[in-house]
Image (cartoon, rainbow, N blue to C red):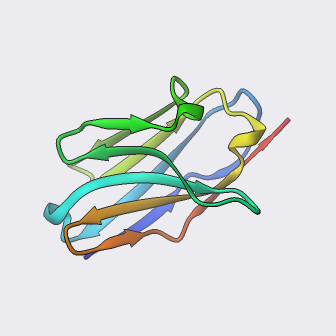
Amino acid sequence: QVQLVESGGGLVQAGGSLRLSCAVSGSIASINAMGWYRQAPGKQRELVAAISSGSDTNYADSVKGRFTISRDTARNTVYLQMNSLKPEDTAVYYCNALGSRYDSWGQGTQVTVSS
């Protein structure tokens, strides 16, 4: 199992940028993939970006070209750099870690983009 703690959310104007961080602790070597998800009010949680243990990445079509997922193995941290933010990006963003026997989630961090 791993423990995840997100940070970096906040209020930003449309067109602005934020960087979310996910600090990882626990059995880090057992992680197969990590991802960022988001959930807006009244909507289902959706995958935003993911990165595999081999550093392959994939993104939701709605964020391609604007968001970048990365990781710093020395700091045991995964990042989500969000540029050109839009009001429709407003949501609670969750960090996720997928292992062979677990599916761990952070507590979430609120991102609000004003128009």
Q: Position of residue 15 (x, y in %)?
A: 72, 26
Q: Is residue 93 above or below residue 84?
A: below
21 or 52, which is in the foreground?
Answer: 52
Q: Is residue 19 above or below residue 63?
A: below
- In the displayed structure image, the side of residue 14 where residue 6 appears, left or right: left
Question: Which residue appears at 39% of the width and 67% of the height?
Answer: 4
Q: Is residue 1 above or below residue 14?
A: below
- Quadrant location of the N terminus? bottom left
Question: Which residue appears at 55% of the width and 27% of the height?
Answer: 66
Q: Is residue 114 visible?
A: yes
101 or 95, which is in the foreground?
Answer: 101
Question: Which residue appears at 44% of the width and 66% of the height?
Answer: 5
Question: Which residue appears at 56% of the width and 65% of the height?
Answer: 108
- In the displayed structure image, the side of residue 49 where residue 41 appears, left or right: right
Residue situated furthest right in the rendering: 115
85 or 17, which is in the foreground?
Answer: 85
- In the displayed structure image, the side of residue 66 where residue 24 appears, left or right: left
Q: Position of residue 53 (x, y in %)?
A: 19, 48
- In the displayed structure image, the side of residue 84 where residue 48 appears, left or right: left
- Quadrant location of the C terminus? top right
Q: Is residue 78 above or below residue 41?
A: above
